[in-house]
């Protein structure tokens, strides 16, 4: 689907380029034919010239966008390759050690634990890529009433365990108004993926000192929001909207050690839109933390 879409776009701009060439030829021919009528020549010349300039601007913007997209695509390929290769190499090393050396039971169990961690990392990368591929395709509607507050609490506990965080490093608060529970109509699996991506991003970009606050609110009877605030690297104002694009990664030198595919927030945005909601980010600048808010329509349970 993506390839055919890009082919159609490229074909359109090839045709546009041909038309611009024909327009330029027509302008020159018109100059010769209509030279004896300077008024008509000036009028047509201005129109043709404006059309030519507009076409060149559109064509140039397309080329710039394609160049950026290719750069992001190359960055994504490199990131995914690293995310796949590193755990595979680690698992292979542990297996070779177990095969060629005698290790005691305690060390053997530690090797098993580390290999399972690498397997989880590997599966996480594969899931990210698969979910990003599914984001652009319509699936059979599997939406049912979901206890969103319970789902968020569950995701917080899973993130706290997987990242080995203390309770004070990843805190959860809830303020449910206008009713006893916060429900949404949605696909529980997709909603869980969206919240988990927000939590993983917050932890990943917090640096060495993780301090993440997850807050569930119901501003009114029609909306439920979950905000994830970290005290990490922060985001420049001009990048706040770009971070939700496919393959986009924040341009910050201090993040060179942070690994990822650039798909997490893209997946969150796709899921939010599919459920009739939205997601947005807030930050006061670099080094001042980031808050990402996921807002969804609320339903009664």
Image: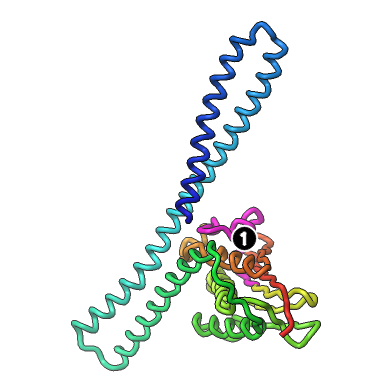
Q: Is residue 120 left or right of residue 271?
A: left
The answer to whether 254 is drawn above or below residue 123 in the figure is above
Q: Nearer the viewer, residue 43 or 67?
A: 43
The answer to whether 247 is drawn above or below residue 277 in the figure is above
Residue 195 in magenta? Answer: no
Residue 247 in magenta? Answer: yes
- Residue 114, position in %: x, y? 37, 82
Task: Give the overall secondary structure of the magenta segment.
Answer: loop
The answer to whether 234 is drawn above or below residue 149 in the figure is above
Span colored in magenta: 229-252
- Residue 56, position in %: x, y? 57, 32
Tell me where residue 229 sits by quadrant. Answer: bottom right
Crowding at mark 1 (Cα within 10 Å: few <14, some 14-19, many 20+): many
Q: Nearer the viewer, residue 277 or 168?
A: 277
- Residue 176, position in %: x, y? 75, 83
Tell me where residue 275 sits by quadrant. Answer: bottom right
């Amino acid at each position: 689907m993506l390839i055919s879409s890009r082919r159609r776009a490229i074909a359109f701009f090839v045709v546009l380029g041909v038309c611009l060439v024909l327009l330029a030829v027509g302008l020159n021919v018109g100059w010769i034919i209509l030279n004896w009528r300077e008024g008509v020549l000036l009028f047509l010349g201005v129109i043709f010239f404006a059309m030519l300039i507009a076409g060149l601007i559109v064509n140039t913007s397309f080329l710039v966008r394609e160049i950026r997209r290719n750069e992001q695509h190359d960055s994504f390929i490199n990131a995914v390759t690293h995310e796949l290769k590193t755990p595979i190499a680690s698992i292979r090393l542990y297996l070779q050690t177990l095969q060629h050396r005698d290790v005691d039971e305690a060390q053997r169990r530690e090797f098993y634990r580390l290999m399972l961690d690498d397997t989880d990392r590997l599966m996480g990368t594969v899931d990210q890529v698969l979910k990003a591929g599914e984001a652009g395709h319509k699936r059979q509607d599997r939406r049912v009433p979901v206890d969103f507050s319970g789902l968020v609490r569950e995701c917080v506990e899973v993130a706290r365990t997987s990242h080995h965080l203390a309770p004070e490093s990843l805190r959860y608060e809830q303020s449910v108004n206008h009713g006893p529970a916060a429900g949404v109509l949605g696909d529980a699996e997709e909603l869980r993926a969206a919240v988990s991506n927000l939590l993983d991003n917050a932890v990943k970009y917090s640096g060495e000192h993780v301090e993440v606050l997850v807050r569930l609110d119901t501003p009114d009877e029609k909306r439920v929001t979950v905000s994830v605030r970290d005290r990490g690297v922060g985001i420049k104002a001009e990048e706040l909207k770009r971070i939700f694009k496919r393959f986009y990664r924040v341009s910050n030198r201090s993040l060179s050690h942070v690994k990822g595919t650039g798909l997490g927030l893209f997946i969150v945005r796709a899921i939010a839109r599919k459920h009739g909601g939205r997601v947005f980010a807030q930050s006061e600048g670099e080094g001042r933390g980031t808050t990402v808010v996921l807002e969804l329509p609320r339903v009664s349970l």
